[in-house]
Image (spheres, rainbow, N blue to C red):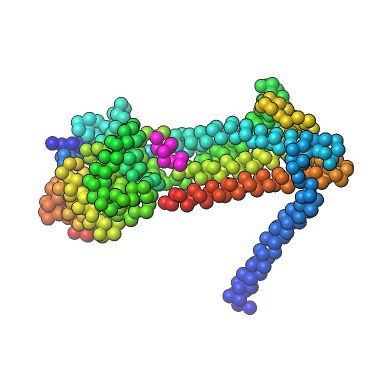
């Protein structure tokens, strides 16, 4: 067999191996989704969404869980977005590009990879105990804000880095200050990338459980939180609580809640993709 | 009257000595062409005139650079005022990703011009001066990117004119354009010289001889020869200038 035929064989072989790999990955995902859907889909109704948790599976609902998740999402976004974008702008546009800056940059990128439970321990110590916030929504949001801050900073930096230098030069050349240039030209041009990063970070918040367990979020909360100082539960914790029970009815509840959680993250990712495409179309260099 | 004066100007990028003891005087309402092979320092010198090199890591300079008698590298100089005074047109057309109208209005808005009627008048006047008004007056709301390359470059010139500079720096403004658009830019330069002092960097020898009153030849960071364009091109005093202009290197 000469090398040309051999290469062709390798080529064809890889095509099928690659196809099989893709298929098995998708297959596992499909089995998972079908399994969950067959268990839980029939359980989802208005009552399920609007009911408090209960010892009786058929009466129990996810009202406290999704309102808790909504609170956490809102508070975390309010804390982390301004901080993250500002830090990203500073590092990319204002800060000097020296050794210290590159050390900081590498460390921020590394922070994005730290296991989330470590953030939970940090949050417990600082927000829970030192600031005396206990197991409140505020303590949880601060902790999750810390967790996604590196992601937002990195996304902002990457988005701003992609804005052509000629755009900044054009603005400076007309006598604009650095802030005017950043605000009127660079930020709008990078907004698509920044928004995408933010939404992906927030969809991580929706699914995050470990740090919230550490700071003391409760698995059973019989009321809807009404202020940032209230105790709370979130969707993944409610799911974990139900699934760890022996009765099959609670398992069904868990499956139904998983479907809703998946729906939330799919929608958020969808919005991220939509925004990215929209911005790309609006600005073509 | 001289409007730009460089006295023993040196420039460095890190360890690279980019300009060596440049002395030059540029008169008001003239077109001065800076020519020379790539890396000769002509663009560095041009970008020093509105301190655009400030953003390059490791750039530093020595000597005195006077514009209308004022040292522009003094600490108290406000960059915003300097650049309003010394406008710049870049090598590649770089309009903002906004409408044609907003591109021209931007320089006014950042300087706090609130009166929309005044903005409108200045936009129209600037577009007329840049000989673009006729082509865009019905599509001012359209994206600047819908224009052709040559139109975009004239839009960039209009944008610069709108903030009323007295000096316009042009960094190879036609190098990315087709011959017809280039001709239009050159016509425009000829018209603008009545009111503005223009300094233009160009690779194109013919362009330099067509548009400029005076020409400065840079080589390896030195100003080799500076004089009337007609003299430089027909009767250069220095051998290097002659070799470059006749195309023996470049």
At which x and y percent is residue B137? 29, 49
At which x and y percent is residue A213? 75, 33
Q: How many marks?
A: 0
Q: Which residue occupies the extreme front position in the image?
A: A46
Q: Is residue A228 visible?
A: yes
Give the position of the N terminus of chain A as an image quadrant.
bottom right
Instruction: Say whether residue A164 is left or right of residue A28.
Output: left
Name the image quarter holding residue A125. Answer: top right
Instruction: Say whether residue A250 is left or right of residue A181.
Output: right
At which x and y percent is residue B100? 34, 47
Viewer-nearest residue: A69 or B215? A69
Name the image quarter holding residue B195. Answer: top left
| A186 drawn magenta | yes
Residue beneath the point at 31% across and 30% down: B78
Instruction: Say whether residue A277 is left or right of residue B80.
Output: right
Instruction: Say whether residue A147 is left or right of residue B5.
Output: right
Viewer-nearest residue: A267 or B227? A267
Residues in magenta, as a range: A180-188
| B7 drawn magenta | no
Q: Which residue occupies the extreme bottom position in the image?
A: A1
Look at the picture and state if A20 lies above or below A243: below
Q: What main secondary structure does the magenta stretch of the protein show?
A: helix
At which x and y percent is residue B214? 16, 47
Residue beneath the point at 67% across and 40% down: A206
Residue beneath the point at 22% across and 34% down: B67
Q: Is residue A238 visible?
A: no
């Amino acid at each position: 067999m000469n090398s040309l035929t051999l290469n062709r064989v390798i080529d064809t072989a890889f095509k099928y191996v690659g196809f099989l790999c893709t298929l098995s990955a998708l297959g596992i995902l499909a089995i998972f989704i079908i399994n969950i859907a067959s268990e839980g889909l029939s359980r989802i109704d208005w009552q399920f969404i609007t009911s408090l948790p209960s010892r009786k599976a058929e009466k129990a609902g996810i009202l406290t869980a999704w309102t808790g998740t909504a609170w956490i999402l809102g508070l975390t976004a309010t804390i982390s977005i301004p901080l993250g974008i500002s830090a990203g702008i500073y590092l990319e546009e204002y800060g000097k590009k020296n050794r210290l800056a590159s050390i900081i940059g590498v460390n921020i990128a590394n922070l994005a990879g730290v296991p989330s439970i470590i953030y939970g321990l940090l949050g417990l110590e600082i927000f829970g105990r030192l600031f005396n916030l206990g197991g409140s929504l505020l303590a949880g949001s601060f902790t999750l804000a810390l967790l996604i801050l590196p992601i937002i900073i990195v996304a902002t930096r990457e988005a701003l880095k992609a804005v052509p230098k000629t755009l900044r030069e054009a603005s400076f050349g007309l006598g604009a200050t650095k802030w005017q240039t950043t605000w009127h030209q660079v930020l709008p041009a990078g907004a698509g990338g920044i928004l995408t990063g933010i939404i992906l970070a927030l969809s991580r918040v929706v699914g995050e459980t470990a740090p919230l367990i550490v700071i003391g979020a409760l698995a059973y909360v019989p009321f809807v939180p009404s202020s940032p100082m209230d105790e709370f539960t979130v969707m993944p914790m409610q799911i974990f609580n139900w699934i760890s029970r022996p009765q099959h009815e609670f398992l069904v509840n868990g499956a139904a809640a998983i479907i809703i959680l998946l729906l939330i993250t799919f929608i958020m990712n969808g919005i991220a993709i939509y925004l990215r495409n929209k911005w790309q179309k609006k600005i073509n260099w | 009257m001289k409007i730009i004066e460089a006295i023993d100007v040196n420039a460095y990028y890190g360890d690279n000595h980019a300009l060596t003891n440049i002395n030059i005087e540029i008169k008001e309402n003239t077109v001065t062409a800076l020519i020379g092979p790539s890396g000769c320092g002509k663009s560095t010198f041009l970008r020093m005139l509105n301190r655009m090199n400030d953003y390059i890591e490791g750039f530093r300079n020595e000597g005195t650079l006077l514009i209308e008698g004022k040292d522009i590298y003094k600490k108290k100089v406000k960059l915003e005022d300097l650049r309003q005074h010394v406008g710049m047109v870049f090598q590649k057309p770089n309009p903002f990703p906004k409408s044609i109208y907003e591109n021209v209005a931007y320089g006014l808005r950042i300087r706090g011009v609130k009166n929309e009627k005044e903005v409108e008048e200045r936009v129209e006047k600037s577009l007329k001066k840049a000989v673009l008004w006729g082509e865009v007056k019905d599509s001012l709301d359209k994206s600047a990117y819908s224009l052709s390359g040559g139109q975009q470059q004239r839009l960039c010139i209009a944008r610069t004119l709108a903030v009323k500079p007295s000096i316009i720096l042009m960094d190879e403004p036609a190098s990315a354009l087709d011959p017809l658009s280039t001709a239009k830019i050159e016509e425009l330069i000829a018209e603008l010289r009545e009111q503005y002092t223009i300094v233009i960097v160009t690779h194109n020898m013919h362009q330099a001889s067509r548009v400029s009153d005076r020409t400065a030849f840079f080589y390896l960071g030195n100003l080799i020869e500076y004089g009337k364009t007609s003299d430089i091109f027909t009767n250069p005093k220095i051998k290097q200038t002659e070799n470059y202009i006749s195309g023996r290197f470049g």
